[in-house]
Image (cartoon, rainbow, N blue to C red):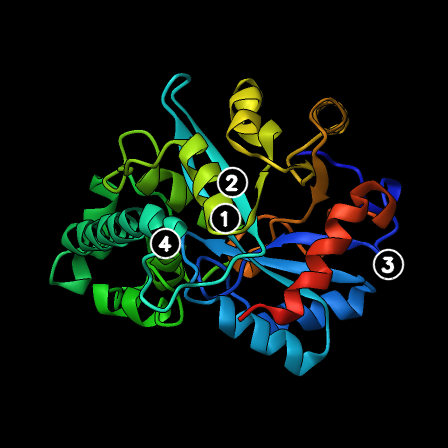
Amino acid sequence: MADSAPEERHSVRGAFDLHTHSVFSDGSCSVGELIGQAKDAGLAGMAVCDHDSLSQLASVRACAREFGFPVLAGVEISAACAATGRKVHILGFGLEATPNGDGPVERLVAATLKARSANTLWQAWRVVRAMGDDTGEVASRLAACDVSDAEAVDPAFSVDAVVHIAAASTGVYKQHVMEALVHLPYLDEVYQRVYRSLFKGQGICASDISYPEATDAVRAIREQGGVPVLAHPGQMDSWSVIPDLVAAGLKGIEAFHPDHDAESEARALRAAREHGLIVTGGSDYHGRFGAPECVGLRCVGPAEAGAGLQELFEREPVLR
């Protein structure tokens, strides 16, 4: 992760944080809380891009109108590239949910959302089984599963507790499992040790799902009238797929992100010039459920974003 303060790259005041997450997916903050933080930071506008769902867009827009603050209600589509075997994330702006949920984007992400929730509930069930029915055996059973800091684990952990924490979300995420399990923020050292023990390597919760092809995600966003943007290519090493994404209709690239160093930023800016793409940037803020510490940690200035971003904000008020 780049260690420069945001002020060294951009003035936060008057800039745009175009990548945040709310309780509608795997963030800990409500949309209103995100807007409040953005206003306090002096941002000119922001985007809320929750994962793999459009059903929350109307609620995000209603909240933005209530607060009188410029917000892009977006989506982040979890995708992949079969040729490279790497994950690729695509942001989508300017979209509306369809009345029956049968738009191109909604049909594309429906399987992801269902599979992720099912997988996460299975992971929660695995933890419950490891803990056993007798709460006195929590430490020993988790230790046997190579889970560190077992004493930090809530003995009352249950699948129901995970579902309760995820109640506002359009899906169930491993962040909800961790919140129910340890009640600690993502950056806490104990959280990190427990998380790695459970979800990484040979952990009892190590499991993933399949994702749609990234070019299909770009096409779906365009077909539904939206603007597709490649998210954090430096974080996911998705540089090689850019030409194919452009051919499919890609319109923007996220240059500024907490996991982008100066070299990644420069590479993204070169790709934007080469392919005529809108430049975006954002914090990828998840509240206590993620590493970025605040809204606006990374952002994009009006001059860098250009007219394309202005057009998105001008269009937003008429969307539902």
**Distance from label 1 to label 2 (Cα)?**
6 Å
Q: Earlier in the sequence, mark 3 or mark 1?
A: 3
Could you say whether the residue bearing mark 4 is in a helix, strand or loop?
Answer: helix
Q: Quadrant of residue 177?
A: bottom left
**Distance from label 3 to label 4 (Cα)?**
33 Å
Q: Position of residue 213 (x, y in %)?
A: 38, 31
Callout 2, which amino acid? Ile
Q: Position of residue 240 (x, y in %)?
A: 54, 17
Out of 270 and 277, give the one closest to the viewer: 277
- Badge 1 is on which residue? 76
Crowd rating for badge 3 (residues with CA inside 10 Å; few <14, some 14–19, many 20+): some
Callout 3, which amino acid? Gly
- Badge 4 is on which residue? 106
Callout 1, which amino acid? Glu
* Residues at marks 1 and 2 touching, judged by CB atoms closer than 8 Å: yes
Can residue 300 be seen in the rendering of this structure?
A: no
